[in-house]
Image (tube, helix red, strand yellow):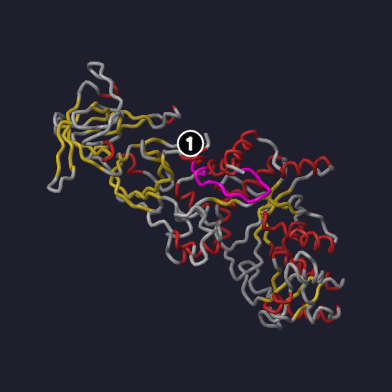
Amino acid sequence: MTEEKLVEEGSARSLNFLEEIINESIDRGEKRIQTRFPPEPNGYLHIGHAKSICLNFGLAKKYGGKCNLRFDDTNPVKEDVEYVNSIKEDINWLGFQWAEEHYASDYFDQLYDWAIELIKNGKAYVDDQSQEEIRLSRGTVTEPGKESPWRNRSVEENLDLFQRMKAGEFPDGSKVLRAKIDMAHPNMLMRDPIMYRILHTEHHRTGNKWCIYPMYDYAHGQSDSIERITHSICTLEFDVHRPLYDWFIQELGIYPSHQYEFARLNLTYTVMSKRKLLQLVQQGVVMGWDDPRMPTIGALRRKGYTPASVRAFAEKVGVAKRDNVIDLSLLEFCVREDLNKTSERRMAVLNPLKVVITNYEEGKKELFRAVNNPEDETAGTREVPFSRELYIERDDFMENPPKKYFRLQPGGEVRLRYSYLIRCEEVVKDAAGEIVELRCTYDPMSGGGSSSDGRKVKGVIHWVSAADAVEAEVRLFDHLFTKEDPNNVEADKSFLDYLNPDSMVKVTGYLEPSLGGAKPGDRFQFERVGYFCCDKDSKSGHPVFNRTVTLKDSWAKMNK
């Protein structure tokens, strides 16, 4: 499905298939809608999780229901309270608040009791095989698996062994508890899946109370059932897990939560795999999990994205039943649209060329009024200092311009934004022939947009006063990868072989003085340049700005 089609569907607000399912549930008499967002606290959330957050919380809100936050903390080896806190921060930043906060570890006692019940009913057994032996005995999609030699242990022996597993009598990996289903089942996940494994590891919430931990497939559906989740919404890769989800609930005779799957989000020039993202961080390819080139929510926040823009992106992408790859430019389109309405304008020169106005009095300074945001009258105005020596963008001057070039050229005139008309009288070069300075004259009667003789010019360029400019580090970000799909690489290559060497370019920018007081997180449009956000690395006397997105909108042009 093309991005254009997705946007059309989102704009029309036609029901997606999950909304249709919920409507059918309501028609059947379901009076309560309850969803949940169940992240594992083993890493930082990314844009794909943002889509899931918007979906789960959004559906609950639309139907007057509730959405819980539940941490799937069943693997203490990889989980940490740091991730718990970051996940909460990300959800709040996106503008959502959960109804109840839960953890799978809240239900460890109940899950254990239910495992005992399954053993007593002959539906679970303790297996002494190693993980590798279990893997080899599962069979293939065309061949049935082989039953474990321990599969037919008595109920009494299984109860005794499982209780001793809980008591810590056995080492890691020596035994597991498996569901007793069907080793010839066409769905390989139904071939006696593992329910519990032994892990003598301290848990971030339960400490050392437990040394056996439930597997995701055993804990997830029962946790949903305990919370009476009506619509358990997962990404598409979990569709093969649904029969097992239903099997446990049916065998235990508990509240019948049901799972529904939607397509996960994939973006061009991006990797979403936690393993790959961790590799980028550990190998120092990026500055950390919140590096603005990463797809994490923290990275988007640091780069200058707004919560509204991320929510708008999730809405435009919509909900599909099959995986698709969304062009990264759609995400940029969403933030550009929001920032255009909300960000104040400032002038900044990133590739400076000095201009000296020869007929302007030395030492003189004027203040001109500049509009903060033409899209928002309430944003007001600010004062911008003007002096004899200025910086303009080097790209705004050409010594030998083509036809219809309306910026500054020898003998040509342009208007300096908010101030005077100037004419280029002389080009100064160094010994190597490089242009180092322009000497210009100004029309003293043209200040503030008027001209003494009614002359009009087509070119308007931005500038900063050299004496008043704030020097800043400006980081220009681009795609982290040169390949549109870095997940699909040649057999002899790694995704790391497609890193973009120019994904972050640092330049020294000269900014109007009002930007000297910017705080981390403040967003601006640098006029005629792009949208930028003040970075957390900023220090007194050394501001740092990240480019959020350019002014150029490639996605809108592609989808006209």
Position of 342 compared to 440: left or right?
right
Q: Position of residue 240 (x, y in %)?
A: 73, 60
Q: Position of residue 342 (x, y in %)?
A: 47, 36
Q: Position of residue 60 (x, y in %)?
A: 70, 44
Q: Which residues are magenta?
A: 317-332
In this view, 286 is above or below 507: below
In this view, 370 is above or below 6: above
Q: Residue furthest top?
A: 453
Residue toward you, 494 or 49: 494
Residue toward you, 27 or 276: 276
**Residue linked to disc 1:** 557
Q: Residue at x 15, y 48 (%)?
A: 432
Q: Amino acid at mark 1?
A: Lys
Q: Position of residue 383 (x, y in %)?
A: 31, 32
Taking the magenta stretch, the answer to whether it contains residue 387 is no
Location of residue 447 by image quarter = top left
Position of 179 compared to 387: left or right?
right
